[in-house]
Amino acid sequence: MVDNNIILLAQQGNRKAIKVIYDDFAGKAFVICLRYAKRREDAEDMLQEGFVKIFQNIKQFDFKGNFEGWMRRVMVHACIRFLGKIEIYNDIEQPEFTNLKTNTPTIISELSEMEILALIEKLPNGYKLVFNMYVLDGYDHAEIAAKLSITESTSRSQLVKARRMLQSFKQKQY
């Protein structure tokens, strides 16, 4: 875990401190990128862009929150920007005005992390993007709507559809 002295040195441009931060967080950051990317090469590009943003903006970290949490948010934003560049948002479906509440028992809660990530990988891009942002990265529907230029109801709809699809994937395995 990176301590505050390393962060301060990195904020001053110390290359060794920057390398320590990179080495400490790169594995976790790559997992984030893999969740958003369809291809490993895209995840690698996202990782690179994310670290560029982290180190360009490291002076903005004010030690009031968790440094790793701050880096995670920067990395997620980099992934979203990358996806915007390749127009992945086009896969986001407009909501159907049906009952979006789901009362089915959650099979997903019984899965391991690796099983969940494998199932998420099968989702259509729009579902995957909203699911990642809401469930795994903690954005609310208003934030997702603002970042993706969609409505909150579209975000909610994508999330419900993603959850239903994940449930159906898991049920087919049994």
Image (spheres, rainbow, N blue to C red):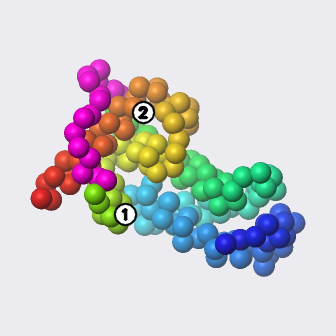
Q: Amino acid at mark 2?
A: Ser
Whether residue 165 is in magenta: the answer is no
Q: Where does the image place residue 63, in percent across and percent down from the top left?
A: 79, 55
Q: Nearer the viewer, residue 139 or 39?
A: 139
Q: Where does the image place residue 25, in percent across and percent down from the top left?
A: 61, 69
Q: Magenta segment, which residues?
A: 94-109
Q: Is residue 161 above or below residue 67?
A: above
Q: Nearer the viewer, residue 116 or 111?
A: 111
Q: Where does the image place residue 160, in percent across and percent down from the top left?
A: 32, 36
Residue 7 picture quarter: bottom right
Label ID, residue 155 = 2
Q: Where does the image place residue 62, in percent across and percent down from the top left?
A: 80, 52
Which circle, 1 or 2, is nearer the viewer? Answer: 1
Label ID, residue 5 = none
Q: Amino acid at mark 1?
A: Glu
Q: Earlier in the sequence, mark 1 or mark 2?
A: 1
Question: Is there a contact, CB below 8 Å, between mark 1 and mark 2?
Answer: no
Whether residue 106 is in magenta: the answer is yes
- What's the magenta bit mostly, secondary-structure-wise? loop
**Residue at 43% over, 66% down:** 40
Label ID, residue 113 = 1
Compute the Cα span from label 1 to label 2.
23 Å
